[in-house]
Each structure stands twice: as C-alpha cells, then as structure tokens.
Image (tube, helix red, strand yellow):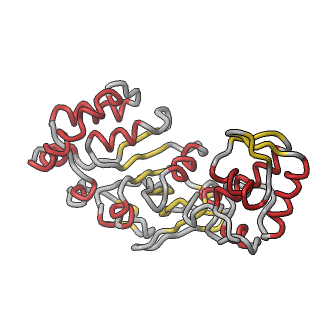
Amino acid sequence: MTFSTPEILYLQRLVHAGPGRRRAGDAARLFCEHFSLGTLIGSWIEYRADHIESARQLLRANDLPITPMSSDASRADVAAFGGLSEKALSTAPHANSVAIRCIGHCSLDGAPLHTPQGTYLVVKGDVAARIACQRLMLVENLETFRELELYRWIDYEGLSVLVIYRGDGHLTPSAPRGCILGRQEPIWVFVDFDPAGLVIANGLPSDRVQRLVLPDMAWLAEAATTSVGRALYAAQESKARGTLGKASNPEIARAWREVQRLEGAVTQERMRWAPVPPHHSQLLPSGRLGQ
C-alpha cells in the first residue's frame, strides 16, 4: 500500500511520541481500521506499546523512514527509501537557492568568480555566504538582474560587488534575504523607484543600507511624471505610507519624500534608458570597463 505524506508523518509522530491517546483524525482512523493500530474510544484512539511497535514495523515493511526527514532533506536523501517518491518529504529543488552575479574581483574560497555578460549563477545559500566581496547589491526584478550591462549609468565605484536577485516564485526570497542578513558588507539596493520598491529597501538592515542605486534625479523626476508613473504611485502609496513614513535610513527617507513630491514612479526596466553621467567610468558585470 502506498501511504500519503500526511499518513507517513502520522506514523512517524506516533512512533516518536510512544503510548498514549490521539484524536481520531483521518490518518488515525485509517490505521486503526485497516492495520489495527490503536483502540477507538469515542473520538479518541488509545495506543499501547505493542501498537507503537506495529507502527514502527509498518514503516520498515514499506521501506519508509522511521524518523522525520530533516527540513532541508534533498530528493537524493528521500530517494534512499524505496517506499517514497523522491518528491515527498523533500525540499523543492530551488529551495535555499540564491541567484548571483559578480562584478569586479569577487572570489569563492579564494578562487576568482566570474559571471560573463548574459549569465548568472544559482548557488546554495551556504555557498553564497562564502563569496568574498566589498558590497552586496540587491536587485528587485529578474530581467534587470540579467541585463545589468544595459544599465550603463550605474557606477560600481571600482568595487567588487556581489549582486543578489531578490527572488520570486521559483527562487524564493527567503534564501537571498538570509544570505544578506548573515553577512556584514554594506548593502546597495536597486529597486523600482516606487513605494513598493522602497518598502523592499526599508526591509533590510537600516544601518547597512549604504546606497539606493538610482539614475540622475532630474531624469528620474521627468520619467516619473507620466500616466503610467502616476498610476503606479496611486496604486501603491496608501499601503506603503505607514511603513515608509517611519523609515530611519536617510537614503530611503529622502527617496520616499521625492516619490511623494512627484506623485509618480519609475520601474527598473524604464531606468535602462537613463543617461550615463559625463566622465563616468563603469565597471561592467563582465569585468570590463565601459566608456
């Protein structure tokens, strides 16, 4: 018989807890009725020591783990048990994954780490934690993250920068956030110039956010005051107002005041077309100097 994940977990909890009584839920009733595990008394099922041993043997007979798998169990870990699908009780393949790009002279365990134009790496959180750099830069949107070379106005100041994608439905934001919180480098934040983007920036450690990565403010002001920009601002302002009104980081507070003054917004994608400042020397994500 093939057991569902909740049924397997119920057996494991039963073995771990030992004799006693449990409420007669669906899994408890199934094992009581079909495998004589426990004695049904009203809305409860009572378990003796021999019932617990039978639960243990049932798991063994079906080549299932006696104890719960760890929260970070891989599909390979689970596949060691013939009675389990490799997808059951395991983390998703992209769990604890961080998408990164390397600018300048980043290194991993002393070896140079390079992400050529049009590429990025997806690494486990513990690997991302070992990459040496001088700055962390969080990027909100995947398209922008992948095409940083096209944002020629960004000045990386000649530093080695580990660029981290914020995450999405496939690469969950918890791993990138955990990576950032577990490190000590100053943080640059490249998000949409809108209330929601500033809320993302405000969710990072205030004392470590050194810079909001934004283009020339005169260009930004003009780009924000369009019908699309005003609509973005109007849709987000009320939800962000309470949070951003308390922003303690001066960069974020200053940007919020400007967004409010303009009553407009600019997406990262639009910022691609911002002008390059005169005499601007830009270190590209490919490691080359732009003109």
Q: Quadrant of the C terminus?
A: bottom left
Q: Nearer the viewer, residue 35 or 5?
A: 35
Specify the farthest residue to the front. 42
Residue at (77, 66) in percent of width and height: 64
Vertical relation: 126 (above or below) 232: below
Residue at (32, 44) in percent of width and height: 197
Q: Is residue 265 left or right of residue 7?
A: left
Q: Nearer the viewer, residue 281 or 249?
A: 249
Vertical relation: 200 (above or below) 286: above
Q: Quadrant of the N terminus?
A: bottom right
Residue at (77, 60) in percent of width and height: 35
Q: Nearer the viewer, residue 20 or 274?
A: 20
Position of residue 246 measured from the top left corner of the image (x, y, whole percent):
36, 24
Specify the farthest residue to the left. 227
Report which quarter residue 218 is drawn in. Answer: top left
Position of residue 113 measured from the top left corner of the image (x, y, whole percent):
57, 67
